[in-house]
Amino acid sequence: MTMTIHINAQPHITQIGSTLASVQTQLELPVQGCVFAINDQVIPRGLWHQTVLNDGDHISLFQAIAGG
């Protein structure tokens, strides 16, 4: 069975029981210098493999940008 999640306001269909890490791999999302927040709560990188996503979750992907 599948569910719909939203990553940066874009809908994506994934398997029920997917973790943040599995979705990151499946969608080839960047990892280096990135932070994920689910429903406005930042998820530490060490918890990505055990963070199970739910239908309708809103995931924000933030990438560090070098500036000067």
Image: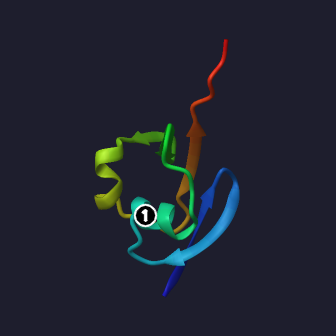
Residue at position x 38%, y 74% in the image: 17
Q: Is residue 59 above or below residue 65?
A: below
Q: Secondary structure at mark 1?
A: loop
Toward the right, the furthest residue is 10
* Left or right relative to 32: residue 43: left
Q: Is residue 10 above or below residue 61?
A: below
Q: How many marks?
A: 1
Q: Which residue is mark 1?
A: 53
Residue at position x 43%, y 59% in the image: 20
Q: Is residue 25 above or below residue 33?
A: below
- For the C terminus, the image quarter is top right
Residue 44 percent across, percent down from the top left:
35, 41
Residue at position x 58%, y 66% in the image: 27
Residue 23 percent across, percent down from the top left:
49, 66
Residue at position x 52%, y 82% in the image: 2
Nearer to us in this view, 59 or 27: 27
How dense is the environment of label 1, judged by Cα within 10 Å: few (below 14), some, or many (20 and up)?
A: many
* Left or right relative to 48: residue 26: right
The three-letter amino acid code for the residue at tag 1 is: Leu
Residue 39 percent across, percent down from the top left:
51, 47
* Left or right relative to 62: residue 19: left
